[in-house]
Structures are given as C-alpha cells and as structure tokens.
Image (cartoon, grey):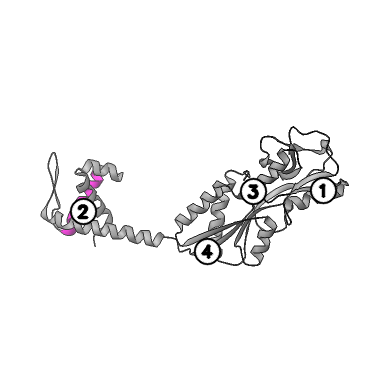
C-alpha cells in the first residue's frame, strides 16, 4: 500500500523541482524529504527520480506514478472534506430583541450558515416577551433578549444598568405627570419602569408608544419623553437621570440567550455557542 506521506513528498518535489524547496513547502528538512523518496522507491521497487547537481529529473516509472499519486492525494482530500462537513441541516428560527439586531450578530449567523450549508436561519425582530411566547408556541427556536429579573431559564450573556434616559439639555425639573416613551407590552423595560414609578408614588403618562429603539431615543433626545433603556444605548444628547432627580433606581437589564427545549438540540447548542462567543467578546448592547 502506498503511503500518503511519501506520495505527498514525491509530488511536491516534482512540483517544486527541488528537494530543498519541497522541504520548505512541507515544513520538513531536506534529509526527511530524501528519506521519503528512498522509502517510496523501495515500496515500488523502481527508481522514480534522478537527481543531478542542478535539477531533478523524473524517470519513466516516476512519470507513470505521478498521475496516480495526484489522484490518490485528491481523493484523500475529498474524503476528509466530506467526512468533516457538518451534518446539521434544517431551518432555525431566531427571535431577536432590537437590542441585539446589529451587524455583529448577523455576521455570526452568516458565518454559521457558511460553515453549515444545510442550515437556513430566519430572524424575527420584536419585543422579548413576544419572542418568548412565540418560542413556547413552537414558532421560534432561540431567543435573544433582555430580562429585568430572571424569569426564563437561559444563558446570561451580560448585564448592565437600566437607566432613565432624557435629553441632556432638558430642564432639570421633571414634569408631572412624568411623560414616558415606552415599547408596547410585554416589554421588560416598560414593566419594571411602571412598577418602580408606582411603588414610588410618581404619576406618569405614556407620551409616546414606540415600535423601535430609534423612535425611543428620538423621544428622549428631544426632551419629549423620558425612556427606560440600557446604559450602553445612551447616545450623544442623552443623559441618565438618577435618584438625585427624584426617580427610583431601576434594576439591571440581563441580556439572555434562551433555547427552546424542543428541536434539534445539537444544532441549537452549536449555534448558541457561536453566538455566545461572538457577543460576550464585546459585551455591550449596540443601539439599533
């Protein structure tokens, strides 16, 4: 049986036209390459190369073997490629809160599909509470979203303070009732903000019902309303109101990855691991 290692050295010597260059290409020593050629010639029982001081010449038997050698090495590469290919297949549906809908996540999903060509990923952006409900009904396989006080089991990616965002140039004296910019129910930021204001006896009104992070920040930046949001989403023109301004402290927002207990757990775990590795290397929510 012909040894793949010996065949690879044989082909490389011919391609490079030199034992020295072949050794460099294969990261071996020249004596090792010479030893491989002697062993290969011993296996076939015939000389394959003739070396002169300036060149390497292929014998007729070497010419006969080179075609087979290239075919054997190519088949070996093809076999390893096929056997190492992912067996994952199917469609994965991901529910993503707007906090997560940024290029880094999408690049991670794209890379996963490239590594697993039989996988298709669909993304649905919405409110975390809606995404959790969709997962329980079997419409979503994996959810990326924030919680304020853990309710659903999952993998904690990172946590950061939830703050009251308002225009940095607005009057320090807050209006009453307090105008709020909020996402629709069931939003964890909305729920905890209303609960904290109620506990503190602070009157409020919903001044703007927002469907996107951009509209939420617009309401706060212009001073039209105060918005609860993660501290990392404070863009220029926004400031965080504190207890010194008469507002209660909000709990941390916990950014979670939650996987459905149904579905192909192997592929969901593999995808979840890729997402965790990508997002936790830069644990900051980015404004959408």
Q: Could you tell me which residue is drawn at 77 percent across and 38 percent down?
A: 241
- For residue 91, the mark is 4
Helix, strand or loop status at disc 2: helix
Rendering coords of residue 286 (x, y %): 62, 43
Tell me the CA gap for discs 2 and 1: 86 Å
Which segment is the magenta one?
Answer: 30-44
**First of labels 4, 2 by sequence position:** 2
Q: On the image, numbered disc 3 is attached to which residue?
A: 99
| Pointer 2 with pointer 1, Cβ within 8 A | no
* Location of the N terminus (image quadrant): bottom left
Q: Could you tell me which residue is drawn at 44 percent across and 59 percent down?
A: 117
Q: On the image, numbered disc 1 is attached to which residue?
A: 205
Tell me the CA gap for discs 4 and 1: 42 Å
185 up-or-down from 220: above or below: below
Residue 34 makes an appearance in the image: no
- Neighbour class for label 2 at 10 Å: few (<14), some, many (≥20)? some
- Neighbour class for label 3 at 10 Å: few (<14), some, many (≥20)? many
Q: On the image, numbered disc 2 is attached to which residue?
A: 39
Helix, strand or loop status at disc 1: strand
């Amino acid at each position: 049986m012909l040894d793949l290692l010996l065949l690879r050295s044989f082909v490389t010597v011919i391609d490079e036209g030199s034992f020295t260059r072949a050794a460099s290409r294969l990261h071996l020593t020249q004596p090792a390459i010479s030893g491989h050629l002697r062993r290969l010639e011993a296996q076939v029982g015939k000389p394959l190369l003739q070396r002169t001081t300036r060149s390497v010449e292929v014998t007729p038997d070497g010419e006969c073997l080179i075609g087979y050698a290239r075919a054997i090495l190519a088949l070996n590469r093809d076999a390893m490629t096929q056997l190492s290919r992912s067996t994952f297949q199917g469609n994965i549906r991901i529910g993503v809160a707007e906090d997560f809908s940024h290029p880094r996540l999408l690049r991670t999903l794209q890379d996963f599909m490239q590594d697993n060509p039989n996988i298709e990923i669909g993304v649905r952006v919405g409110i975390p509470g809606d995404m959790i409900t969709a997962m329980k009904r079997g419409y979503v396989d994996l959810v990326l979203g924030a919680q304020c006080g853990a309710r659903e089991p999952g993998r904690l990616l990172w946590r950061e303070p939830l703050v009251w965002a308002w225009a940095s140039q607005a009057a320090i004296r807050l209006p009453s009732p307090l105008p709020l910019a909020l996402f629709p129910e069931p939003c964890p930021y909305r729920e905890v903000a209303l609960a904290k204001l109620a506990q503190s006896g602070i009157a409020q009104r919903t001044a703007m019902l927002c469907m996107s992070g951009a509209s939420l920040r617009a309401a706060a930046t212009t001073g039209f309303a105060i918005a609860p949001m993660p501290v990392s989403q404070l863009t220029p023109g926004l400031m965080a109101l504190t207890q010194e301004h008469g507002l209660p402290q909000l709990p941390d927002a916990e950014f979670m990855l939650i996987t459905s207990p149904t579905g192909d757990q192997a592929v969901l775990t593999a995808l979840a691991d890729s997402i965790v590795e990508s997002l936790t290397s830069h644990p900051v929510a980015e404004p959408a």
